[in-house]
Image (cartoon, helix red, strand yellow):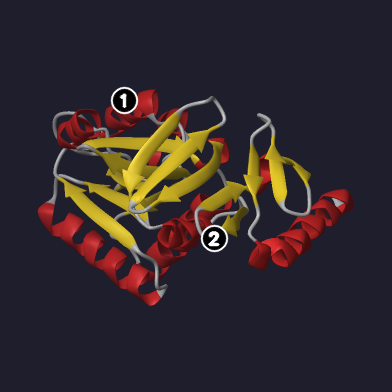
Amino acid sequence: MINIAICDDKVEFSSKLEMLLINIVKEEKIQADIDVYQSGNELLHKLQKDKCYYDMIFLDIEMEGMDGLETAKEIRKQDEITTLIYVTSHKSYAIEAYEVQPFRFLVKPINQDTFYECFRKAYEKIIAGEFYFQYKYEKVYYKVLVSDILYFESEKRVIRIYLKNGTVGKFYDKLNNIEKQMKKGKVDFYRLHKSILVNSRYITKKAHDHVELINGIKLEISGTRRKEISKLYVQEIEDGMDE
């Protein structure tokens, strides 16, 4: 699942952009939530009030009131990773806009093929590099880097998320859903048994029936998964030696 925002004060254009996104995510079989905002202030209010986050933001530069450049600067104060894609009628903004590290510029009127190419490249960047895992508990939204997650542990309907800084969060979901989501990125997670999904990069030792993490925690491997985990672990070590 990726979260996408469109911020443009022209309703006709934002509707067209939303339809292009709906078509491409359907075509690519990508799960996505798409939100549309009519001003930079509206987008920033949502980000700050609800503590929500977006993987990809399409941002019009020439908006009335707070323009896209100022909006992007405010976004970057709380989120250095989200993929910003500027939409503009004038290429002359390029130099100033690069201060906030945009992924790409799209020039109006939008060409469908150009837009689809841009989206695919942005999506590849999101799932290939550092990306966020987001969850909600008691009406509060949380966002953590996947690379900071040690492991997930399920107990009935509750998922606990353990981070490398010692923080433990929790939310309601199924571990199967989390496992599918993690497979979209390049950080490998091992399913040790029905209740544990662990980030492989933090495994420092592997025994026959358990693994040990960098913080000394030992996690059991179920009998039915020992062969599979051994194969994955050995393959990862061999791949690392080839680099």
The tag on residue 239 is none
Q: Residue at x 71, y 46 (%)?
A: 211
Camera-nearest residue between 129 and 151: 151
Which residue is the site of mark 2? 183
Q: Position of residue 97 (x, y in %)?
A: 41, 33
The answer to which of 144 and 210 lies nearer the viewer is 210
Q: Secondary structure at mark 1?
A: helix
Question: Would residue 229 be found to the left or right of residue 167 on screen?
Answer: right
- For the residues labelled 2 and 1, the Cα–Cα distance comes to 32 Å
Mark 2 or 1, nearer chain start: 1
Q: Nearer the viewer, residue 13 or 226?
A: 226
Q: Position of residue 213 (x, y in %)?
A: 68, 37
Q: Which residue is mark 1?
A: 74
Front residue of 242 and 148: 148
Q: Position of residue 200 (x, y in %)?
A: 66, 48
Outermost residue toward the left in this view = 11
